[in-house]
Image (cartoon, rainbow, N blue to C red):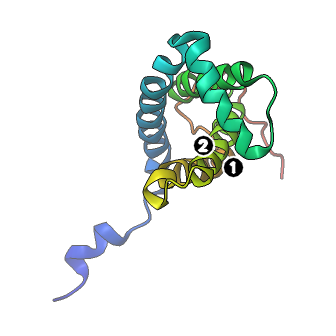
Amino acid sequence: MPLSPLMPLLENRYRTADLGLLLLRLGLGIMFVLHGYPKLMGGPEKWLGLGGEMKYLGIQFAPTFWGFMAAVSETIGGQLLLLGLFFRWACVALLLTMIVAAISHIGAGDGFGGYSHAVESAVLFLALAFIGPGRFSVDQVLFPPRRRLY
């Protein structure tokens, strides 16, 4: 079979990269808001349990604070992802949260199925921190890239 009918599938589609980033941001943002909001609204009791996982990092103090910060990271970070606002800061906050989640699942002996989602999300947020939010973002409007003169 000649390759000519398959050529459109093999072409570079860099012009659609910004649309792909938008779809990725929207999907991830919605999921992290839905995942983090119940934790945020759970109050100090929920935050205490969530922050208690810091013991796997050797941090025993202020578990309620750490749990609150994880809930804020997921909820507000998800909203910032949706908007593409302060995108890299949101990615770093979510990356750190996912690293702690992965370590706590590993420390609890949950096995690969328990920690794989956190590791996958951490890798994704690390990559997105380098890539940026794309053209269809609030960051692009508020902080347009400098023009290079060369």
Is residue 85 at least partly visible in the picture?
Answer: no
Q: Which numbered disc, 1 or 2, marks the residue closer to the eye?
A: 2
Q: Within 10 Å of the Cα at label 2, are there few (<14), some (14-19), or many (20+) other Cα atoms? A: many
Residue 94, located in which quarter of the rendered image? top right
Q: Secondary structure at mark 2?
A: helix
Where residue 54 sits: x, y (%)?
Answer: 71, 37
Residue 10 in percent (x, y) is at 35, 72
- How many numbered marks have been drawn onto this rendered protein structure? 2
Q: Residue 130 got which mark?
A: 1
Q: Is residue 2 above or below residue 145?
A: below
- Quarter of the image for the N terminus: give it: bottom left
Q: Position of residue 69 (x, y in %)?
A: 69, 23
Residue found 71% across the figure and 29% down from its top:
144
| Residue 75 in which image quadrant | top right
- Percent from the top left, x then y, of residue 114? 47, 51
Within 10 Å of the Cα at label 1, are there few (<14), some (14-19), or many (20+) other Cα atoms? few
Which residue bears the numbered disc 2?
A: 101
Q: Amino acid at mark 1?
A: Phe
x 30%, y 68%: residue: 9
Secondary structure beneath disc 1? helix
Q: Residue at x 71, y 45 (%)?
A: 56
Amino acid at pointer 2: Ala
Judge by depth and name the residue closer to the eye, 45 or 74. Answer: 45
Residue 38 is left or right of residue 69, and the answer is left
